[in-house]
Every structure is written in C-alpha cells, then in structure tokens.
Image (cartoon, rainbow, N blue to C red):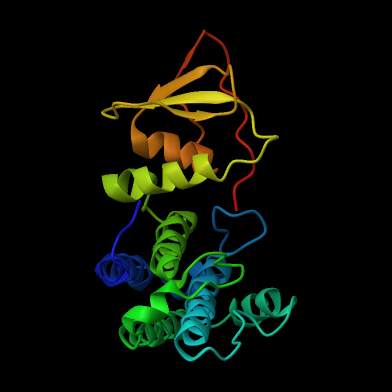
Amino acid sequence: MTIDPLVLMTDVEAATEALLRTAEGLDDAAVGEPSLLPGWTVGHVLTHVARNADAYTNMLTWARTGVETPAYAGPDARRAGIEAGAGRPLSEQIADIREAHERFADAAAAMPASAWAFHLPPPVGQSAAGVPWGRLREVEVHHVDLGRGYTPADWTDAFALRLLREIVTGAHDDAPAMTLRPFGLDHPLTIGDDGPVVGGPTKSIAAWLAGRADGADLTVSPDGELPTPARWK
C-alpha cells in the first residue's frame, strides 16, 4: 500500500495528539503503574514513545544527508534510554513526547522528494518513505498499551487494515497457517497453507495478530480454538 509520506504525517500528528490527551488525563501516580506490556509501567511506554520519535528522526536525517545516523547509539542504548526516563514526573513525560514529535515532524518536513527513496537499514529496513507509517504504528499501538481507555476499537479502519496487511505479509514460515476474512474485505488474507478460516472485524483481527486482543469476538472454521498467533514486534 503506497501512501505519500507527507500525507501520512497528518495521521501521525493526529495520533500523537490523541495519545497526549490520554496522558494529560492521568495523575502523577499513573507513571509508576503497570501498563499492558509485561514488565513495563506507563512511564516506560511513554518514554519509549518519545525515544522512538528521536530514533526515527535520526533515520530521516540519515536519508536526507547521507551521513550515517543510526536510530540508537548502540545495541543497549534503546533499553537504557527507556529505563532512564520511565520514572520521570508525568509533566516531563508529556513535554518530552511533544518535543520529540516536533523534532520528528520538522525532520519529515525538511526531506527533499528524492530523499524519501533512500534505503534505510533496520529498524526501517526499506526506503525512508516507510518511516511515517512506522511512527504511526508505534504511536497507535503503544497508545493501546498504556491501558488507559484507548483500545483497538479506536483505531481508524485504514490504520487497522494496513497493520493487518503488514503483519500478514511479514509473517515468518513458522507462523501458524490461517486464512483471514475481515468483514468488508472482498479477498481473504492468508498466512501459510491449509489453515483454519478466522473471521471478524478488521480491527479485531489486527489487534489479535498484534497481541493486543484475545480474539474473543472472532470466529474460526472449522469449529475449534483460534490458532495462537506468532509473536509480533
């Protein structure tokens, strides 16, 4: 699915503002409370959202200038940055996310058209045009991970469908086989061969495959238990 990266940046802006509204509705004690991610507090999730924006800013800088600018300074830098910032007061967390987003938005606005075709290494692993989608995915999924009222049902249909297709096309050979029939989609999506047919709302299927829902509202044919999705991200 090809989308103009600058057009997609408007979705990144809206998603970031929605996450910030959720954060602004919390109290200071929430920072230390568990999120929906095992072992991570709400503060860990918020800090990760900020540091991820900076990582993607580095990637866009690399694409624009040609100067190697890795997402993170080293293999342990990502984890260390999250741990270092997780316990900060809520006001600092919110300001950090907003400022990191502004740096990312500025980096995207500074990209000449030719730079979007620059191939970047992981965590992008494709042209720089894929960076805005990567950032949108991080904000939307981790907004759910805060566990503070925002759920996959709040995702847009377009986001859920793109996430679903990305998970399906990126599935490894050891992923359980299944045929997915999202409501309203004319053609099924398949992982492997000869698996059961799983049906339901697109948002629900995407959330289930992403490990953000239990699939309770999905159907499976022939009758039986849902497959266990492969670990995602």
- Taking the spot 59% from the left edge, 81% from the top edge, the residue there is 85
Residue 176, position as x, y percentages in the image: 64, 28
- Taking the spot 56% from the left edge, 63% from the top edge, the residue there is 33
- Taking the spot 62% from the left edge, 62% from the top edge, the residue there is 40
Q: Quadrant of residue 100?
A: bottom left
Could one spot residue 90 in this view of the protein? yes
Q: In the rendered picture of this protein, how many numbered marks are placed on residues?
A: 0
Q: Is residue 49 left or right of residue 106?
A: right
Q: Is residue 3 above or below residue 89?
A: above
The front one of 137 and 108 is 108
Q: Is residue 2 above or below residue 107?
A: above
The front one of 25 and 171 is 171
Q: Quadrant of residue 137?
A: bottom left
Q: Is residue 32 above or below residue 152?
A: below
Residue 167, position as x, y percentages in the image: 51, 44
Could one spot residue 217 in this view of the protein? no
Q: Is residue 152 above or below residue 30?
A: above
Residue 59, position as x, y percentages in the image: 52, 79
Q: Is residue 56 left or right of residue 107?
A: right
Residue 84, position as x, y percentages in the image: 65, 82
